[in-house]
Image: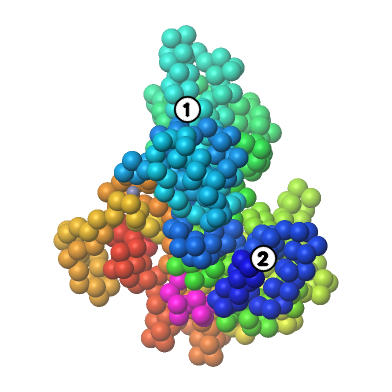
Amino acid sequence: MAAPVKIGDILKARGLINDKKLDIALIQSKITGDLLGDVLVKLGFLSAKERGQILAEQSGIEFVDLDEYVISEDALRLVPKDVAEKNQFIPLDLEDGKVSIGITEPGNIKAIDTVTRITKKQAKMYIVDRDAYYDAMEKAYYFLENPVYQQMEKIVKDIQTTGSPTGNDIVSMTDMLIVEGIRNNATDIHFAPTADVTQVFYRIDGVLQFGHCLPKSIHIGIVSRIKILSHLDIAETRLPQDGAFTFVFLNKGYDIRVSTIPTIYGENVVMRVLSGKGTLLRMEALGFDPGDTQNIRSLFQKPFGVILITGPTGSGKTTTLYSALREVNILERNVLTVEDPVEYKLSFIRQTQVLERAGYDFALAGRNFMRQDPDVILLGEIRDEETAKIAIRASITGHLVITTLHTNDAVTSIPRLIDLNVDKYLMSSSLLAIVAQRLLRKICSFCKVEYELDDQEAAVLREYGVTATKAFKGTGCAKCNNTGYAGRTVIGEILVIDDEIKQMIYEGASAPAIKERAIQKGMRPLKNHAVRKVVEGITTVEEVLRVAG
Ligand SMILES: [Zn+2]
C-alpha cells in the first residue's frame, strides 16, 4: 500500500490537507475499504481533478482536462465502448499515427495492450480524472451513435416537405436542442424568433454562439413543449412567464430554468441549464495572483466580519466561494450555507438549498442559522434589504459571513448596500473585504500563435501602461471547437476594508474617492489584472475588451 501513503504526504506537503483531515480519511478508508485518494475526494478534501493532476505528476504522464477537451470521433470509432470501459480508458485523438488515450490510473498496462491490439497502432497515454472519465465516456459515445446535427437536419427537411411539423418532430427537436446545449457545456439556450426563421444560440464560456436555424413553422410547437414541461400557461403568449423543469440525459438530471418574453416575432425563450457540476479547485488554480490568493485565504480565517464576492452572473463567484471555504478549518468551525442551488457538495459543511415555493429563502435561512450554533455562514446572495441586514447582524454577533452581490466592481458594493438601507456605521465596522471578479477565456494551447498587434489593440494595452507590439491568440482548431479558446481564468480586484477605508465609508465618501484611495494603497483594478494576463499570453486583447470593457 505504498501509493496511498504517498498521496497523503504529497497533499500534506502542499498544504492541501492537514494531519486531522488525513486521519479522518484514513479511518474512513479502513471502514469502507476505499482507496485513500478516493476517500479524500468523497470527503471534499481533494477534487477529482486534483487527484488526477497529482497522479499525473507522480507518474510523469501528462494530464488532460476532459472538461476542456474535444474528443476526436475518429479515435472513438477505433475502439468499441464496452472495450474501452472494461479496460478503463477513453480514446482521445489520433496523433502522428498514434492513438492517444486517457487512463485514470497510471499503472493501467492493460489499456495500452488493448489499444495496440485492437487498432494496430501505438498508444500514447494521458491521465484523466475519474469523475470526468465516466461523464466523458457516456457523452462521447452517445454523440458518436446519435449524430444530433444530422438528426436535426432530417427533421428540418421533413418539415419543409410536409409543410408542418408532427408532434414527434417537436418533441425530438426540443430534446435535441437541450442535449446539444449540455454537450457544449452551455449555460443558456436561447430560442429566438425572427421574421422568417427561429434562431438558436448557446452561451458557452460566457459568450453567445450561434447554434441552429429552424423553420418558423416549428416555433410555436417548441415553445408550447417547453411551457408544458415547465408548467407554464400555453395559452398566454402576450405576457412574460418563468418556470423550471428537470431534464434527464444519460441518467443525470439537469435543472432547467425557463423564461419567456413576447417579442414582435413571437415568444422568445431562454433556458438556463444548471448542470449541478460546480468546480472545486485549489485557490491557486483559479487565476488570482499569488498576493491576492494569500489575501483571500487569510480573510477566510477571520473569526467574524463580512466578506463580499461580487460580479455579474457567470463570473465564477461560487467557484471562488467553494475553493476558499474548503480552506476554512471546517473540522473546528461549524459552516452553514444557503445556496440557490447547491452546486458542489462538501462533507462537514451543512449545506441547504433555497426552496422558494416552500418559503425557504436566503432571509429565512439566515435568521434560523443563528440558532444552529454557527461559526461561518454562507448566504448565497444578497438580493434584498432583509438579507443584507441579516448578513451584517450575523457578523456583528461574532460570525464570519460570506456572501455575494451583483455589482460591477468592488467599490460600487458600498453604495449598493447603502441603497439597501444598511447603516453606514454597521457596514463600515463589519465589512472585511470586497472581492470583485470576472472570468476570461484562456487561449487554446493547441492553436496558440503569436501575432502583431494592430494600432487599436496596442492602444488598449498602452492605456494600462503596457507597451507591446505582439500578443497571443488562438487560431481555432478541432480541440477548441474552432473558437481559439479553452477554459477560463479569473481576474479579480480586492478591496480590503482597513481602518482608513472604514472611516471613509462611515463619513459617506463617494465610491470613486474610495476607489482612488484603495488603488493608492495597492488595490489592483480588474482591468489591470486582465491586461497582465494578455502580457502573460493567457488571454487575448479581444477578451479584455469583451469582459473588462
Ligand atoms: Zn484550438
Number of the label disc, if any, that sits on residue 1: 2
Q: Is 471 colored magenta in this rendering?
A: no
Q: 180 above or below 395? A: above
Q: Quadrant of the N terminus?
A: bottom right
Region rendered in magenta: 288-297
Q: Residue flagged by tag 2: what amino acid is it?
A: Met
- Name the residue nearer the viewer: 383 or 345: 345
Residue that carries the numbered disc 1 in the rendered image: 147
Q: x, y (%) of residue 20?
A: 72, 77
Residue 432 in the image: state x and y as whole percent.
58, 81
* Residue in the picture at 25% in, 75% down: 465
Q: Nearer the viewer, residue 153 or 134?
A: 134
Q: CA distance from mark 1 to mark 2?
A: 45 Å
In the shown orientation, is residue 307 left or right of residue 60? Answer: right
Residue 296 lies within the magenta run: yes
**232 horizontally vs 445: left or right:** right
Q: Residue at x 22, y 71 (%)?
A: 462
